Image (tube, rainbow, N blue to C red):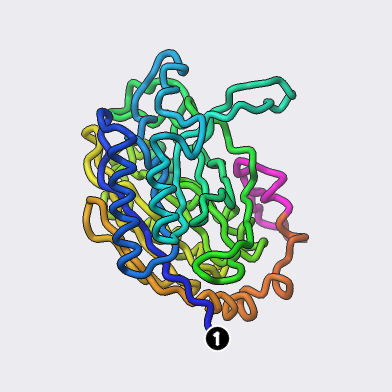
Amino acid sequence: MTRMLTIAVGQLGPIQKADTRAVAVERMVRLLEHAHARGAQLVVFPELALTTFFPRHYCENVADADPWFETATPSADTAPLFAAAKRYGIGFHLGYAEIANEPDEAGAACRRHFNTAILVNPDGDILLKYRKIHLPGHAAFDPRRKVQHLEKRYFEVGNLGFPVIRAPMGGLDGINMGMMICNDRRWPEAWRVLGLQSVELVMLGYNTPSTNQEAGGFEAHHLRVFHSHLSIQAGAYQNACFAAAAAKAGTEDGCELFGHSIIVNPQGEIMAQATSWDDELITADCDLDLCTLGRTTIFAFEKHRRPETYGRITAQTGAVAPAEWRKPRPI
Ligand code: CDT
């Protein structure tokens, strides 16, 4: 008996600043319909899927960015997505900006802002929530940049860790599912924390510009997609899991996002890839038992990991310089 799950990634074309959430949700409902027609049981939508990628827009007063955030899911705007999922018996993963009324680290009541993703089953139950941990970009307006990337201004670092849940999906009794968001995919630590929880499917959404402004023009365009795929394929292979990565694509508010959504198997191979810069559904039939090969052989963690030598990974943030080599003095 195979444990087969048909996974879909619902890539979204650009969502302009003036577009309403209702329009974005309507587009996702169309993709869910396609997913149903193709027999998919789970659809992964991108990071911040309800609005434009607003961290490119500077607000002097951060509270002025609050209209980009959700205070509840489902809401009147997102309810049609939950209803469509129920109608078609499909689960979904959705990224959005979240305002959470919860105590801060000191215990004081607070309105907290996170870059969040949820995993929802066809009944509308939220199975898992993740808040982005590796926030890229900067907190203050940067006059050298043509386009701002203000995630560090608008979001707090996620406070839920990298959780994995085992839950029924697509008629299977239990699938080990975890999430990361966009920049997290470039960090092997994030993958390993999920891998150490026996994750079988990592879902992630991303909004990645086609140029790296921090590189001063020295990073070639074609390497942007390569680095994204390299990170996802390596993460899936080294943790023996499937990965479903959903992009926002095309020219949004005049800024190009590179798309190239993919579904990857535990061997690190791309099973499906988006080819447009628009709304597009890609699907793959994923036999979750294929995770067993890697995790019982080359990546049998319990046999081969050497955590006693990995202390620096958690003890240290930045890199330090190594000791200088000196020619030994002749005796
Ligand atoms: N959204 C997001 O995390 N994007 C980053 C690019 C940031 S460039 C400052 C990414 O890693 O794709």
For mark 1, what is the residue?
1
- Which residue lies at the image location 38% right of the left edge and 35% below the top edge? 77
Going by the image, does 254 lie left or right of 184?
Answer: left
Q: Amino acid at mark 1?
A: Met
Going by the image, does 109 lie left or right of 205?
Answer: right
- Which residue lies at the image location 31% right of the left edge and 58% below the top edge? 33
**Farthest residue, direction top:** 61
- Which residue lies at the image location 56% right of the left edge and 48% below the top edge? 126
State which quarter of the image contains the N terminus: bottom right
Q: Is residue 173 magenta?
A: no
Most common secondary structure along the magenta stretch: loop
User: Where is ligand 1, by quadrant?
Assistant: top left
Q: Which residues are magenta?
A: 311-328
Going by the image, does 225 lie left or right of 189?
Answer: left
Q: Quadrant of residue 160?
A: top right
**Does residue 104 sit above or below 169 in this rendering?**
above
Residue 230, how many percent across, how many down?
41, 61
Residue nearest the observer in this picture, 296 or 104: 104
Q: Is mark 1 within 8 Å of ligand 1?
A: no
Residue nearest the observer in this picture, 42 or 155: 42
- Which residue lies at the image location 63% right of the left edge and 43% below the top edge? 320
Q: Secondary structure at mark 1?
A: loop
Q: Quadrant of residue 250?
A: top left
**Farthest residue, direction front:** 87
**Does residue 69 sit above or below 208 in this rendering?**
above
